Image (tube, coloured by chain):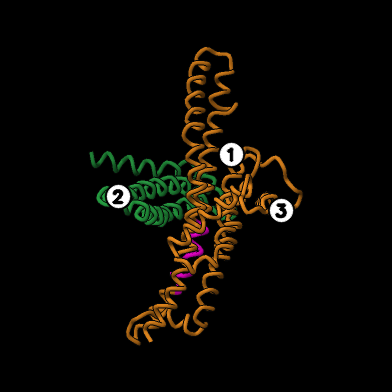
């Protein structure tokens, strides 16, 4: 199981190199892979973090319905701050995917 | 990005799209406020009533976050909020470009916030005392370290304001662009119209599903995000300004 996973990983990493090593442009495929994997990790972990924040905020709102408005405001600000970390990754992914000025060769 | 994003219908030659549509937002907001305030009445009706409700929402937020003395910053906060909200919503209209989907516009807003809250803090307290407060309540040998850390954290604020608004808007645009690309004439709807039976079945079902998904879920989500991002931008601006003011009060308590 573990060995097959490693083999798949090696195959995934080796494939673009093999396909594009001839014309020397092998960084661009890696950039696409990095954008995808990085965004996936960022989105998943951002979801975990935001889930914790929302869970405890809803908990607090259920205990203290009177303070729900203030808790909600604080929760939204916290969610924005957590989300901005994933947004940084999104910006880096966009740079990797779309910015033509970077010399990939 | 040019591969999936359609250029807007109206373009001025030689002027970038985000500048053109920033001017359009300015024209819209100025026209609305002029029409609302041209004939002011004690009992507001129509447009004047609507704008008063909007500004009362802003004042309510300011009272909640900054207290009563925060009302003098209402012009800055409400202008930022209305500009960003209008820009966000305008980017959802097909054929128009949103100014907030460009890094330059959001950076301009964030730099305005940065300069404004430092200016407010420095004016409340004097430049030297305000700068002194960056060093924090730590023993003297640690003060240079704290000063550098605070400086970096303050410099990170406009960066995060910029990238948050930009990333949220552009991420949504790219998502919508990819969905439209999948369902357009080259994608599912093209299959449905291609004439073959399998294409009609797969493309028809898939096209209906993507249209329902887009209209029923993605578009409301993007409208929510447009309001939420404008709210968060204004809210963080309020927190930064009240932080600069409170630092002043805190500082004067110490002495």
Query: What residue would you read off at disc 1?
Result: B4
Q: Position of residue B19 (x, y in %)?
A: 68, 54
* SS of the residue under disc 1: loop
* SS of the residue under disc 2: helix
Chain whose colour in the figure is green = A
**Which tag, 1 or 3, sits closer to the chain's start?**
1
Q: Is residue B159 magenta?
A: yes
A47 or B229, which lies in front? Answer: B229
Location of the C terminus of chain B (image quadrant): bottom left
Which label lies toward us, 2 or 1? 2
Chain of the residue where label 2 is placed in the rendered structure: A
Chain whose colour in the figure is orange = B
- Mark pair 1, 3: CA separation: 43 Å
Query: What residue would you read off at disc 3?
Result: B38
> Which residue does the image show at 49% across and 38% down from the upper left?
B220
Q: Which mark is residue B123?
A: none
> Which residue does the image show at 54% across and 78% down from the upper left?
B123
Q: Position of residue B120 (x, y in %)?
A: 53, 73
Specify the segment rendered in magenta: B151-163
Q: Position of residue B17 (x, y in %)?
A: 68, 49
Q: Residue furthest left?
A: A1
How many numbered circles are shown?
3
B113 or A74, which lies in front? Answer: A74
> Which residue does the image show at 60% across and 26% down from the upper left?
B185
């Amino acid at each position: 199981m573990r060995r097959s996973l490693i083999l798949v990983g090696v195959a995934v990493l080796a494939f673009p190199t093999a396909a594009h090593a001839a014309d020397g442009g092998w960084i661009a495929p890696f950039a696409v892979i990095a954008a995808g994997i990085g965004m996936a990790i960022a989105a998943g972990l951002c979801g975990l973090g935001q889930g914790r924040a929302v869970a405890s905020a809803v908990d607090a709102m259920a205990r203290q319905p009177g303070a729900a408005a203030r808790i909600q405001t604080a929760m939204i600000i916290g969610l924005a701050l957590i989300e901005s970390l994933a947004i940084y990754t999104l910006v880096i992914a966009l740079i990797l995917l779309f910015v033509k000025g970077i010399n990939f060769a | 990005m040019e591969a999936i994003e359609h250029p807007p219908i109206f373009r001025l030659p030689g002027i970038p799209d985000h500048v053109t549509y920033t001017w359009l937002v300015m024209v819209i907001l100025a026209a609305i406020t002029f029409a609302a305030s041209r004939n002011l009445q004690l009992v507001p009706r129509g447009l004047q009533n609507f704008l008063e409700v909007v500004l009362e929402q802003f004042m309510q937020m300011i009272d909640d976050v900054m207290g009563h003395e925060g009302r003098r910053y209402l012009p800055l906060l409400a202008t930022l909020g209305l500009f960003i909200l209008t820009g966000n919503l305008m980017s959802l209209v097909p054929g128009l470009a949103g100014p907030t989907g460009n890094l330059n516009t959001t950076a301009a807003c964030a730099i305005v916030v940065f300069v404004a809250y430092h200016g407010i803090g420095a004016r409340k307290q004097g430049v030297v005392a305000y700068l002194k407060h960056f060093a924090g309540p730590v023993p003297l040998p640690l003060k240079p370290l704290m000063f550098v850390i605070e400086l970096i954290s303050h410099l990170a604020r406009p960066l995060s304001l910029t990238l948050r608004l930009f990333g949220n808007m552009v991420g949504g645009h790219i998502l919508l662009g990819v969905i439209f690309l999948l369902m357009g004439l080259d994608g599912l709807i093209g299959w449905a119209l291609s004439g073959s039976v399998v294409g009609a079945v797969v493309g028809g079902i898939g096209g209906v599903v993507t249209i329902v998904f887009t209209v029923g879920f993605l578009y409301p989500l993007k409208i929510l995000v447009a309001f939420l991002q404008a709210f968060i931008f204004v809210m963080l601006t309020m927190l930064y300004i009240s932080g600069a003011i409170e630092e002043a009060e805190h500082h004067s308590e110490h002495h």
